Amino acid sequence: MTTTRYIFARIAQAFGVNRRQRRMSEAASEMHLLREAEQVLGQSVWERVEEVEELGVEYWNLRKLIKERNEIGTKLAECEAFLADAHDQRSSLLNAKSDSQLELEEKRASLLTELETLAKDRDLVIQQAREIRRVYDGLKMKLEVTQHDGVTSATEKTKSRMLELKSQFTQLKHDRDRIAASIADGDAMVDTIDAELSEERQKHRAEASVAFQQIGQANRDISSFKAQQGLIDTQMRQLYSEIGRHVSRNAFINDQCRSAAKGHIQMIDVMRALRKSVAMNHRLAGM
């Protein structure tokens, strides 16, 4: 608000035109801009105010806070680097396979291939045995018929063939039992290998759990350091604002402040205008 607008607003108030809410809103908006300008100015000139006695506390507190923030930043960078390494280590441990594990997996795959072949052989033996059993049953029925009819030559030939088939069936039964035993042994070996593989994987998970704990601790440390940085940043902004407020108010009456504000006079002029406008709006609002 300019002086001319203020005069017109006062005249309007004399005639009953009172815009108190508008004046309060304008004052709040201008005050917000002023506070931001004070912080920006203070951040720009704080290194020049060492000789300003009134700002000694703010200046040296800023030096201390900046040092602390740099130290925390170094620790934070170390933690973030450690966290990245821990993630890589955990990933490599979970995906890594030892030589013994690779050997076990190869042996398991070979056994499964052999077991598949044995299963096919067993099915083939069972199929052959069923076919022989079917032929045998047919010959048995033929024998009953020929014996009833008294055909001696056919009876002897049928009996001979039946004995031959019975021998083949017995051999196939032995083959089936032998293959079944091999399959059972193979299954047992696969179970043993699976148990050994489980132990190997458990070792990797145990090692990875250590890395996971390190990741958790690193995340907690990073959160703590960031919280400390946030607190320091808040304190620094407050100190910047105090410095900017003092320098802007005294830039034209104090030589040290004038020297510190060199190059920022236009900003200070705007800040003085904002202060004046805020004061006029407050008066118009009856504050």
Image (cartoon, grey):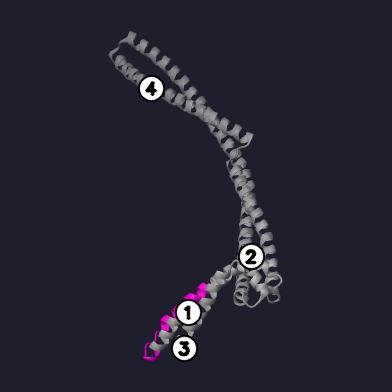
Under mark 4, the amino acid is Arg
- Nearest the viewer among 16 and 105 is 16
- Label 4 element class: helix
- Which of the 4 image quadrants contains residue 164? top left
Closer mark to the observer between disc 1 and disc 4: 1
Of all residues, the one furthest to the top in this rendering is 153
Q: Position of residue 207 (x, y in %)?
A: 64, 46
- Nearest the viewer among 186 and 255 is 255
- Image position of 118 with respect to 276: above or below: above
Dot 3 surroundings within 10 Å: few (below 14), some, or many (20 or more)?
few
- Image position of 248 with respect to 226: above or below: below
Mark 3 or mark 2: name the one nearer the start of the chain. Answer: 2
- Nearest the viewer among 240 and 225 is 240
Mark 3 touching mark 4, by CB under 8 A? no
Which residues are the magenta region?
Answer: 13-34
Mark 1 or mark 3: name the one nearer the start of the chain. Answer: 1
Under mark 2, the amino acid is Gln
To which residue does mark 4 refer? 133
Q: Position of residue 125 (x, y in %)?
A: 44, 23
Q: Position of residue 99 (x, y in %)?
A: 63, 34
Residue in the picture at 31% in, 17% down: 142
Under mark 3, the amino acid is Gly
**Residue 10, disc:** none
Mark 1 or mark 4: name the one nearer the start of the chain. Answer: 1
Q: CA distance from mark 1 to mark 3?
A: 12 Å
**Secondary structure predominantly adopted by residues drawn in magenta:** helix
To which residue does mark 1 refer? 27
**Residue 228, disc:** 2
Closer mark to the observer between disc 3 and disc 4: 3
To which residue does mark 3 refer? 286
